[in-house]
Each structure stands twice: as C-alpha cells, then as structure tokens.
Amino acid sequence: MSVAQSAPLVIDVTGINKHFGEKHVVKDLSLQVREGEIFGFLGPNGSGKTTSIRMLCGLLTPDSGHGTCLGLDVLRESTAIKRQVGYMTQKFSLWDDLTIAENLDFVARMFGMKNRRDVVDQALEELGLTTRRNQLAGTLSGGWKQRLALASCLLHHPKLLLLDEPTAGVDPKARRDFWEEIHRLSAAGITVLVSTHYMDEAERCHRLAYIAYGTLLALGTAEEVVASQGLHTREISGSGLLGLGESLRQLPGVDLVASFGATLHVSGKEEARLEASLQAVLQGTALKMAVVPASLEDAFIYLMQGSQDQFQG
C-alpha cells in the first residue's frame, strides 16, 4: 500500500521549528507528503505531534524553517493554506442542541458557501447521515458524532484533511467504517494527516512519522519503521508468565519486554545474546519460545522507551 512517487508533493518542509516560551516543542522537522497520501503521526502525549501537524497545515506559523503546503509558503501564507484544510479535532466541537442538518448548515454558512441546502444534502448522503438529519447532535453515539464531524470538515471540499486522534472513544466497528471512508477520500486525491495511538490505524497509513518530544525519530512505511529499529523478537507463551516480565528485562541482550495478550514479546538488538539469555532462563520450565517478526507496536514501545521528556521535572 503506497502512493505513487510520481504524485505531486502537497507538503515539502525543511528545518521547521516551534517554541512556546522556553520550550522547544518541534525541532528541525523536515518531511514530504504526496497528494492522496494518508500520513500518520505517532508519539507519546505531549511529544509535538499536533503542533507539527498544525504548522504543516497553516493553523500555526513556524518560528523558523521553510517549505510549502499546497504550493503556498508555510511561514508567509498560512491564512491561504487554512482555507484549503479540513480540521477534525479530537474533542467533538459542533453544537449538541442543533440537529445534524442544522450543524452542517451553520458550518456552510460560516464558510460563506452558496447553495447551502444542496451542499448539506450532498454531505449527508456521502457520509450516510440522511436518515438522521433531524436528530440532535447531542443524542448521537461517538461513532455518529465522528461521522458528523468528518462531514463538517469536508463541506468546503478541502484538499488537505487534518485528523487529531479522530477515533478516540468510538467502538471498533465505527473505527473500521471511519477508516474505510478515509481511504475513499485518499483515493479521490485528498491528502490526510492523522495522529493516532492505535497500531492498527497506524498500519492503515501509507507512511508514518514517529515524533518524540519535538524530534522526528523514524519515518517511512510501517514496515520501514519496524525494520529501522533492528529488533529481533521472541514470543514467550505458557502458564507462569505472571511477574516474569520484570526479571526478563534484566537479562543481557533484552532491550524490550511487552505483554501481547496471553504472551510476552521479548526483543533485543543483538539476536545471539537475546536467544542465549532466554534459553538459559526458560530451560526446565513449561514455557515455550518462538521466533516472531517484530511488530509495529514493538517498534513503537521501543522508540517510546528510548525517548525522554525534556520538559519533565
């Protein structure tokens, strides 16, 4: 799953920086995003993901650096960029005491759109909201609120869509349906920037950026991000795993221990040391060990484990 390298660049920035007071929240960010690409941002809370995305989309002006978004200068033409961006916030930000149709009509009016009724009817149809058009937004479930929020973002036909943890708090089916819609929009040429903590969603992105406390640490497809960490992983299964993780973390060659359902994933950079340490500990026990490929979640936890919040303390 990838976007053609011949697709035009929608975002092309180099050395982007942002400070809030004495805090350097985004450090020398450089990346490119192509038309129709679904580009995911991963990282710990407070790591600069949302600030980075907002700078790329004209919602926040960088302190320094240079580059373009939609052919416009990110430092000097942020206002013009904003007009072509749809922004879906993590928190539902429409009006609970208006119906679905009234919410969309209000947003269309704010954009100064002509033929508002036709625009709203089209949005209701495309997002499967027609039968609920007269339902108050405040009575909707999380999944339907999410669908309404997306419809409002698309009313002005943006070329770039910014989604800030868009599926937080919705059920798995609603998340799956939402991502089907995002891929439909991508296929239509809309570029999507999305921040997420869900690994299954990250794997649905064409490419990923891992940002930790302002610094870009990994960039590429999910497979490339995993490969870049050079982890070798063993899966430990069987009865008696409770409390084993902490002792495994102390072993030579073990860089990461993470619970995966009823198993443990134990990973390390040096495969021979990892294997020898685990063989010695598991010998004579009923536990089983199997070689498994490192997952995106393994890589994510490893990266998070190695990053440090410079603002703590």
Image (tube, rainbow, N blue to C red):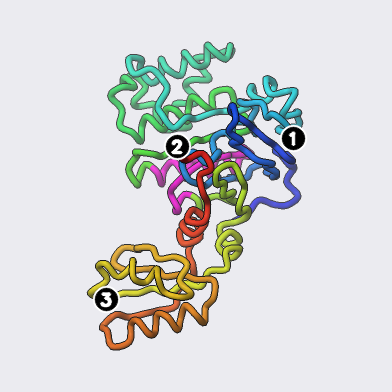
- In the image, 54 versus 310, the foreground residue is 310
Residue 198 falls within the magenta-colored stretch:
yes
The outermost residue toward the front is 313
Q: Secondary structure at mark 3?
A: loop
Contact, mark 1 vs mark 2 (Cβ under 8 Å)? no
The structure residue drawn at horizontal position 45% and vertical position 58%, both measured from the top left corner, is 297
Q: Which residue is mark 2?
A: 166
Three-letter code, disc 2: Pro
The outermost residue toward the bottom is 284
Q: Position of residue 298 (x, y in %)?
A: 46, 62
Contact, mark 1 vs mark 3 (Cβ under 8 Å)? no
Question: Which quarter of the rendered picture does the N terminus lie within?
Answer: bottom right
Q: Which residue is mark 3?
A: 238
Q: Residues within 10 Å of mark 1 (few under 14, many from 20)?
A: some
Q: Position of residue 29 (x, y in %)?
A: 67, 42
Mark 1 against mark 3, which lies toward the viewer?
A: 1
Q: Is residue 222 above or below residue 177?
A: below
Q: Secondary structure at mark 1?
A: strand
Three-letter code, disc 1: Gly
Q: Which residue is mark 1?
A: 65
- In the image, 112 versus 48, the foreground residue is 48
The range drawn in magenta is 175-201
The structure residue drawn at horizontal position 44% and vertical position 32%, both measured from the top left corner, is 90
Q: Secondary structure at mark 2?
A: loop
5 lies left or right of 170 = right
Q: Position of residue 220 (x, y in %)?
A: 63, 55
